[in-house]
Image (cartoon, rainbow, N blue to C red):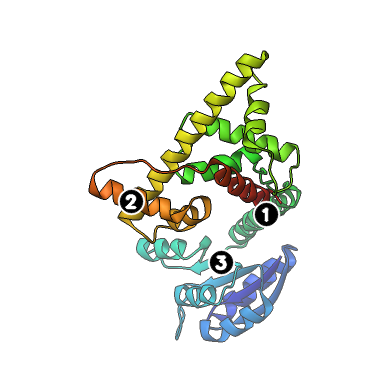
């Protein structure tokens, strides 16, 4: 261990120096008679331990510790004092002093305390080394990649229709288009898309036809719900981010404005629904997100 001794009493410095060297506790790398003299030397040599007198002229022990800590000195402090003032002792502990050596200096006490501090120092360094080792072996957090469904649900949620009955039909259609790697244009006819989806649960031609029509109606109602939601957003705040992005992109803005006027005037909620445009734009957005 590397020690630095700060004490205005030359005899005390000599005694501590002899004890440390004779007991092979470490090496005294510097001495100073007061805090002002000690600070630059300590910051330059960076000892493991500073043995420092509590009461010194010009700059006492506690003030010296504060100055060193302000300059980011990370070594440990052992206070030397003949004062038994509880308040001063408490303040010293608060500043980071780990042990006290009492004056007059006693050889056995000094050896006992320095061995304890050395043991604590080694233990602290071992724990720090273990932590660093564990940190280096920690597996980097793997961000879970969003699925196609996650992206679709996110968009439908923005438009307030993720809970609509037709949202599942829309989700399955887009998933199917992605899995089949369809080009953006032209998409298959809607009738063909509905039939493929219907065949996942139905087998006979009549059942497939009936389910296809039901799918179309569910999707139409769901898209209309999205238009109504966006129209309401536009009425409240025309600069709303969802309104600004989805209204002109997924729909004809004229139809959205017509809906806004209806809602404000008489509460009517009827307008044209362009399913093909909605599916086309949604598919385009999903391809962009998963690219």
Q: Which mark is residue 139?
A: none
Please identify the quadrant where the N terminus is shown.
Answer: bottom right
Image coords of residue 65 (percent x, y): 50, 73
Local packing at callout 1 (Cα closer than 10 Å; few below 14, some 14-19, many 20+) is few
| The image quarter in which residue 128 lies | bottom right
Q: Which residue is mark 3?
A: 77
Q: Secondary structure at mark 1?
A: helix
Q: Secondary structure at mark 3?
A: strand
- In the figure, is residue 58 to the left or right of 7? left
Image coords of residue 51 (percent x, y): 58, 70
Q: Earlier in the sequence, mark 1 or mark 2?
A: 1
Q: Which residue is mark 1?
A: 128
Q: Which mark is residue 260?
A: 2
Q: Earlier in the sequence, mark 1 or mark 3?
A: 3
Does residue 245 appear in the picture of this structure?
Answer: yes
Question: Residue at the location (47% across, 39% down)?
Answer: 223
Say above or below: 36 vs 51: below
């Amino acid at each position: 261990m590397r020690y630095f001794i700060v004490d205005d009493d030359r005899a005390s410095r000599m005694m501590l120096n002899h004890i440390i060297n004779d007991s092979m506790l470490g090496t005294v790398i510097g001495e100073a008679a007061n805090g002002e003299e000690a600070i630059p030397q300590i910051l330059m040599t960076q000892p493991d331990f500073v043995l420092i007198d509590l009461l010194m002229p010009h700059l006492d022990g506690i003030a010296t510790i504060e100055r060193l800590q302000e300059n980011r000195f990370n070594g440990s402090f052992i206070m030397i004092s003949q004062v038994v003032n509880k308040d001063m002792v408490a303040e010293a502990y608060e500043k980071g002093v780990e042990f006290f050596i009492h004056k007059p200096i006693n050889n056995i006490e000094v050896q006992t305390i320095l061995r304890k501090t050395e043991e604590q120092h080694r233990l602290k360094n071992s724990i720090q080394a273990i932590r660093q080792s564990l940190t280096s072996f920690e597996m980097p957090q793997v961000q879970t990649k969003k699925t196609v469904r996650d992206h679709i649900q996110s968009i439908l949620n923005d438009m307030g229709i993720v809970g609509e009955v037709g949202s599942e039909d829309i989700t399955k259609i887009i998933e199917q288009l992605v899995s089949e790697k369809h080009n953006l244009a032209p998409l298959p006819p809607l009738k063909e898309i509905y039939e493929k989806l219907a065949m996942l649960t139905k087998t006979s031609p009549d059942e497939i036809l009936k389910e296809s029509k039901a799918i179309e109606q569910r999707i139409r109602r769901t898209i209309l719900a999205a238009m109504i939601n966006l129209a309401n957003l536009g009425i409240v705040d025309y600069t709303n981010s969802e309104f600004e992005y989805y209204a002109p992109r997924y729909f004809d803005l004229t139809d959205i404005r017509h809906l806004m006027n209806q809602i404000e005037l008489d509460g009517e909620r009827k307008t044209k629904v362009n399913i093909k445009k909605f599916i086309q734009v949604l598919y385009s957005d999903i391809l962009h997100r998963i690219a």
